[in-house]
Amino acid sequence: MDEHNGAMMTARTLKVLIVDERPTAATAHEEMLRRVVQELERIDVRTEFAPNPDDAVLRVASDASLCAVIADAGGDSTDRDAHVDAGGIAEFLTGVRARNSDLPVFVMTGTRGADALDTSVLREVDQLIYLLDDTPAWIAGRIRNAAKRYRADVLPPMFSALVAFSRKHEYSWHTPGHEGGAAFLRSPAGRAFFEFYGEQTFRSDLSVSVHELGSLLDHSGPIGEAERRAATIFGADQTYFVTNGTSTSNRVVHQASVVAGDVMVLDRNAHKSVEQAATLTHGVPVYLTTTRNHLGIIGPVPPSELTREAVEAKRAASPLVEGDDGEAVIAMITNSTYDGLLYHVPTVERTLGSHVGRLHFDEAWYGYAAFHPIYAERFAMHTGDREADAPTTFATQSTHKLLAALSQASYLHVRQGRDPVDPDLFNEAFMMHASTSPLYSIIASNDVSAAMMSGRGGPLLTGISIAEAVAFRRTLARVAAETAADDWALLPWQPETVTQPDGTTVRFEDADEDWLCSSPDPWQLRAGEPWHGFELPDGYAMLDPIKVTVVTPGVRADGAIEEFGVPAPILAAYLEQQASIVVEKTQSYSILLLFSIGVTRGKWGSLVTTLMSFKRDLDANRPLDQALPATFAEDPRRYAGMGLRDLAEQQHEVIGRTGLLALQREAFAAYPQPAMTPAAAYARVVRRAVDVVALDDAAHRTLAVGVVPYPPGIPLAMPGETTGETDGPALGYLRAMEAFDARFPGFEHETHGVEVVDGRYRLRCVRED
Ligand SMILES: *Cc1c(COP(=O)(O)O)cnc(C)c1O
């Protein structure tokens, strides 16, 4: 699909699809069709043929460059396949409309008139063609006009203005100084750069002084129009296009809500940018506690943490909160969680939102939620019940992560409520974090991403991701079910059995596929079900079908380490080195895979076969120099003579002996005591009043820089928090990671805020006076 698409909507040539054989002029009907095709080509409209309606529907689904379809409702030779009879045409139209609600559809009726067609057909058809009555030139002209109108409407406002402007080939005297790329041509490196990206990249790289496109900083012109259109598509009152990632969107939300000394209620499992927002605003954070399950998967914040009483208790317990009046000004939640657990947002609004006037949902990985009914009421801009005095709600989404956009593209959506946002004042915070020279292609990609999700596109594209993920989950579960009882398997993290609407309980892989792809029911976390291991009320959280965690053996549901285990970093290394498959996130006994819009059947099919060959190679103890050549090369002496299974046994033994998993659970559950605010700790960084301290000497110190293991980038300790006892949870966990790293070159943990010198961890602590 991609190769057509590049040139597609911006190319001069229009392309239409005719549901018919290429005409050979055996009959009067065919002769007329042939002349229409000739006429279309004369006026620069390309024609393609689909031999039958099913094929045509597939083409509509896969070729986004089509600008019209022309079907035949029976002319003077109704015996050929291509001729869609009256019943067939209704089916054909349903197929086309399910994929594209706007594509112009023409129906050729030969000598028969509209009276021969059902009303249901007439409703979906844009125009009828009387092949034997009208002239070829007239028919071709009408087809071209409709195709042209469609193409113009398909282009969203900012992108179409950008395309139009880049065609003008003006000489400009403003920035960017590369002048449509010309400057690059003056040096060999520049020329290579120009040729790699192509002229269009540079022609469309414009300065803010181009008034035709409007301004991102004051939301005017086509850019402002594009933002307003995105707001409608995503169900927001205001939408802002942010060109420096959701990292920036998050900072803007808090910059616009918090002043020095204000209490912010933050999900402890928040992205680093939220910590930075606290530092920038001089806010005082208190944290919402979450738990990890036996596998280290992070659960949502339970509802008991969201009540007024729970938050007041946190404020009272914090040595940093001054006075006990004054409510928190904003609360933030990461939705979905890093492992794909989704909140029931109306519940969060009723609890947390009853005592905090602004709620921020970080939906960096979750921009598609508004477009599929399976996610109803599980995203910030939801269309379910909202109380009259519901809080003002923000959603920040990385368009580039799970929608289709260029890196750094992000949306900031606002739904007005209590403690509303004044757009003019909010814009001060927006501009504080914006560049005065945004990259226009990033803005355009936000515009296009919204257009892709509007109308039928959103449900269709999201539905495809869900269907692919469900098919993958079923395949993996089926393979596991067919594995002998005393053998091991790689398992998708999901319920083993589900209860279908007819009351029957079946194994997940045997459940009705359409139901799995459309109903939230099978994905809800129900109280007491052992597969998820969280203590939550029924339906509060739901597993997102497209975020697939694959679990390796090694941990029992009660958290105990089993005799046999396969630590997941080995699986992740194998996938990367054998099949160039890079997983989203690796924990000790699980990996996370994302089924984004770009994932195809072929892509996950080869993932399944690689997972199976991993099992074969592990069982056969395949030598490491073959199974993990890059890892082997890191330290050939260390890994000499070892096989894949030997490595798994050694890693599993070390994890068990050092209690790495239990320490991780404890370390993330027991939040360190704060000694100063993030802003105060950062002031020490600015003044360089920082000591670099080995773990053994780090007890009871205050961290100047937070400690954040990657992935997923959730802080173990924030700046300003204390390290605790030498054998306390935080230092204990860091020491266990340090020991693991020393044993297994190539498998070192990556932890921001930790400096590694000769294999030993060091922390940056506030210098003691
Ligand atoms: C990736 C991420 C961000 C930052 O988004 P960018 O677009 O990369 O700046 C914010 N929050 C969460 C939860 C993320 O995962």
Image (cartoon, helix red, strand yellow):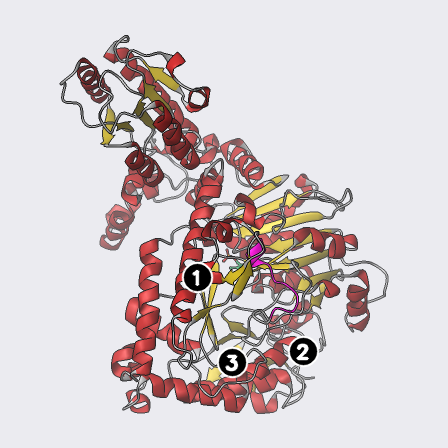
Distance between the Cα atoms at labels 1 and 3?
A: 20 Å
Number of the front mark, 1 or 2:
1
80, 288: nearer the viewer: 80
Q: Residues within 10 Å of mark 3 (few under 14, many from 20)?
A: many
Question: Measuring 31% from the left and 66% from the top, which residue is drawn there?
Answer: 609
Image spot of residue 439 (x, y percent): 44, 45
| Marker disc for residue 555 | 3
Distance between the Cα atoms at labels 2 and 3?
A: 22 Å
Residue 180 visible somewhere in the drawing: no
Image spot of residue 94 (x, y percent): 42, 32
Mark sitting earlier along the chain (1/2) = 1
* Residue at the disc numbered 1: 473
Asked if the stretch drawn in magenta spans residue 525, the answer is yes
Q: Which amino acid does label 3 sit on?
A: Val
165 to the left or right of 413: left
Q: Which element is circle 2 on?
A: loop
337 to the left or right of 161: right
Task: Please tell me in which quadrant of the rendered image residue 286 appears.
Answer: bottom right
Q: Which element is circle 1 on?
A: helix
141 to the left or right of 408: left
Mark sitting earlier along the chain (2/3) = 3
Distance between the Cα atoms at labels 1 and 2?
A: 34 Å
277, 734: nearer the viewer: 734
Mark sitting earlier along the chain (1/3) = 1
Q: Which amino acid does label 2 sit on?
A: Ala
Question: Measuring 52% from the left and 79% from the top, which residue is drawn there?
Answer: 754
| Residue 80 in the image: above or below residue 619 | above
* Residue at the disc numbered 2: 670
Asked if the stretch drawn in magenta spans residue 125, the answer is no
